[in-house]
Image (cartoon, coloured by chain):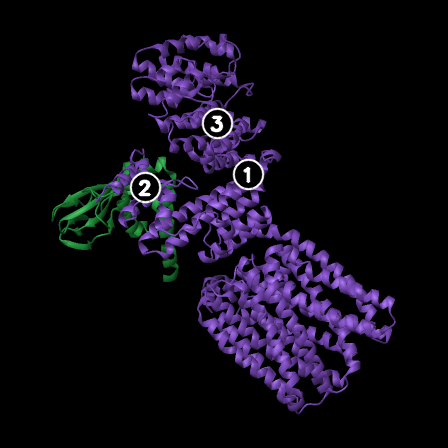
Amino acid sequence: MNPGSFWLRLLNVYPNEWWIVKRLYLFQFFQGAGIAFFFTAVFALFLEKFPITELSIVLISSALLLWVVGFFYTRLEHAVSISRFNMIVIGTMIASILLLATASFFVAQNWFYYLLLAWFNVLYLVNNLQFWGIATLFFDLRQSKRLFAVISAGDIPAKFFGYTLALIFVPYTGTRNLLFMGAACMLASIPFLRSILKSGELELIDRSDQIHKEKQSRGQIGKLVKNFATNIFIRRIAFISLIASASIILINYGFYAEVRKAYQDDVALARFIASFFVILRITALVTKMLFSSRLTESIGIRPALFITPLGMLILTASIIAAGWMSTDIKIVFYLFGVSSIIVDVLRTSFNAPVLLALMQPLSTHERLRAHNIVKGLMDPFASLFCGLLLYISFNIQGRVDLMFLCYTLTVLGVLWLVGIVLVNRQYLQMLIKTISTRYFSQEEFNLNDETIIQHIRKKMSTGTELEVISILKMLTSKVNPVAEDLIIELLSHPSDQVRIESLRLINNKYINIKPKLQTLLISDVSVTVKNEIVKTMCRIADNGQEISKYLDDPDEDIRKAATTGILDNNDVQINKMAETAISNLLLSTETENKKKVISILTEVKDKYDHPAHMHLVNDPDHRIRDLAITAVGKACCMEVLVALVQQIHTNEKSVLAALYHVGTAAITPLKEQIISDTVSDSLKQKLIGLCGRIGGEKAQQVLLELVKKQPQQNAAIIKALHRSKYSTDASTHKLFENIARLYIIYGVELLYMQRYLSKKSDGFHVLNSSLQYEIQDIRETLLCLFECMYDREKINQAKFGLNGKRKESIANSMEIIELTVKKDIGRNFNILFDITAIEHRCAALRSLFTEKQFVQVENILARILSEKPITYQSWTKACSLYFSKKFLHRLDASLYEKYIHSENTMLRETALFASATS
Amino acid sequence: MIQSSTDRLLLVEKVFILKSLSIFKDTPEHILADLAPLMQEEELDENTLIFKEGEMGDCMYIIHQGKVKIHKRDTVLAILKEKEVFGELALLDAETRSANATTDSSCILFRINQEPFYELIESRPEVARGFIKILCERLRAQNEKSVQLK
């Protein structure tokens, strides 16, 4: 089929998926036809020989048989490779049909007829397990939502084909020979299975999971049961599946009971069954192929689950109402027939594919296991439940009561709805858990636990210097008297570094520490420790008397330590004691004095600053200037801040670092710089980013103002707001949604550019890949917007998954976005950044492409160089300039001139090169 | 690659050269655009010693034109050609050179020194991230190889 084919678009299949969809479809077609032949024959033979009430015995025995087969199926699945396993399964199915078909001519005992019908359930189960076992390995969550309905639809024309042929052939061949036709159809499915297995895709999955598989191979049944018991999500899906299967069995049973009364011989029965299923399958085929995937995609995976039970409840309510209002039993019979068709259609078209799509976020092995649980464990339970229910009700009532079945179906319908609500609640949690299974939490330790305290003490005395410092840092996080005691104990540690670190942690809250510090000061300690003790004592002093002696000490280092400690003191009056000393040093012309005062100011930069510090920030000596800039902190004076900002063009890196340390006080001068015309775009972006890093309410307010004042910088502003952990409120939410829509439109334009360039010569692949980075940047901006607007944690998990390389995690992340973000935005985001062919994405987003079509390379190059619709990265612009020259695409001279004076070297030299006439 | 209007290569063209090297093939061009200005062109005659065994290595070389011989005394360990690099680990971790490198023909090499590279990393963390990614991928590939060998 042509990749652009109308049929592919109609079926919602992408060209790269067609090969596997086709093969899976044909495989399921022949398997389905084989099962249809088998069912028509064995059901007609059974109903001819036994009353419908005997069906309950078949259901009970089927349940036991299904468990046995399910057990062997699971054992085998984990014992051999995927390819070998599938060939063994299909071979066994064919052999069993041939054996039963031959035996049907010779064995006439009653048990054989029970076995035949029970074996149909086995074939149906094994086919289901095998088909979905293969299909779920090929597709991720987003693909499965689109494709599961289509690929499984192969089953419907197959059954249509099988039942139609059965209808035609049965008068000539007899019922038993239909079994051989069933085996022939099964045989015809083998080439398609082989082709799928030979593709190597399954082998790759198989190999990558080999180690895991080996570990898992033992005790599979136990693991299935354990998975069922521990995984709440799988348990809830299994519950829905059980209810769905039981409902179908009961609704069909009621219908067959009436059919049995109307038709007596096996051929007539076979013809009726075949005709009935022909109608059923045609309806299901049309629904599945044309509506299922589209409806599921548009309303979402969770609401789609409600369709089948709600449909069934409406139908059973109609039957009950008809039963009350009319005495004509035929009306109930017809309504049962119609209900049987509709519920089956809804189940195969919506319930089954959506349930399987729900399991797609699980890991490969969990998914297969979940599937085996849902089908292999739950179907037999449904069969057993229905068999017992029907058996008991027949023995109590003495007849098949359709109204009783209706009431039972109503109860099941309600339970089904409850089950769906429970599954939906668990779904998002499971998606998030699948993407990130690792949780990082700070190690918690309890200082009230004597064992832990003893362990810490032991480590303090035996650990290395680094280990003890690490313990110290851990202790500072605890406001606890025990922690304080432990810190004081470390003042006697043999390592100077540990003592110094401990001294730095001491603050005013250490009430009884002063005598200990005095004793330590006069003891035999190193000069560095001594200075640190003086500093600490001055820092925690509560009156001037106890520290003035250190300011007058003959030792210069002690004086310096005292000045530093005094300035670091929380009491302003005490601070003033050191101000004269500091002023003298600040106004000194001696380089050494300047260095000394800078060293003091650096230590106390978050608590104290002096206006004269600005002289050092403007000092003619660049070394002093650099040091003075690093001495700027939270306590920065306005005069110093002004001087600092003036240095931004000459000392960008260190000024930005200093402004970050200043924090909120730097926001106003930062804003002035951002809106100034003299600041380059690249510096503006850095300043905007800095506002985001500083964060806080004031920074967010400024950034929000900039969204309106500087829309060309919106990408940087949004990222900065995100960095500052901003969350939208009622007044800004709408604005942010509109920005998100706008950025999606920008992304679509870039996508169209890429599509055009990809059709040109190979030479443009570099420009094309630079556009890819631009699109990725738009994705980053959009995710930042989403985090500001919606649940930050969920979007963050989605971001994590989108940055991964695995197709499954990308699909799961997109599902989170679809569930979290406003519908139109989330949907377009997912299409834009999906990993499907560019043609498909462009086609799906064509309504958002509002610019003129790109008909020439010049259009694209001019659009990039005129910086529309976004501010491109320098590399993309440099590439555009370069290729305009290389491939002789002359552009308007103004576009070159714009960059000839750029401050970016690459842009400047490429613009000069491109504008030169050769 | 077309020749620029000037004698020297444009920065854009240097990015193309970097991108063509196997170690940078997965590094985005906009990150390489920051690395390109650090490339210093060196023209060397045949049989010129580039570095000696045991010397401290603090730069990497890219062969733009010509051939380079890696040898220990007279034993030739490898002959490197255009678009091959040598000494790339010295860019991140200064170590003594394990062999001699001598031009085997007249050569044009690009040299990237460790110090400006470190400065670049400091101001553009995405460059460091790009390099870390390359190293991680190499390590992962190496691990897979080890597992296969076992």
- Residue A368, placed above or below residue A191: above
- Residue A69: x and y in percent read 62, 74
Question: Is the same chain shared between marks 3 and 2?
Answer: yes
Left or right: residue A499 compared with residue B40: right
Which secondary structure lies at badge 3? helix
Which secondary structure lies at badge 2? loop
Subunit of mark 1? A
Query: In front of the other: label 3 or label 2?
Result: 2
Subunit of mark 3? A
Q: Say the numbered circle drawn on residue A736.
A: 1
Q: Amino acid at mark 3?
A: Leu
How many angstroms separate mark 3 from mark 1 (CA)?
A: 53 Å
Residue where numbered disc 3 is placed: A490
Chain letter, purple: A
Subunit of mark 2? A
- Residue B100: x and y in percent read 18, 48
Q: Say the numbered circle drawn on residue A892.
A: 2
Question: Is the same chain shared between marks 2 and 1?
Answer: yes
Quarter of the rendering occupied by the C terminus of chain A:
top left
The answer to whether residue A451 is visible is no
Q: Colour of chain B?
A: green
Q: Amino acid at mark 2?
A: Asp
Query: In front of the other: label 2 or label 1?
Result: 2
Please name whichever residue, A62 or A224, is drawn nearer the observer in this view of the structure.
A62
Q: Amino acid at mark 1?
A: Phe
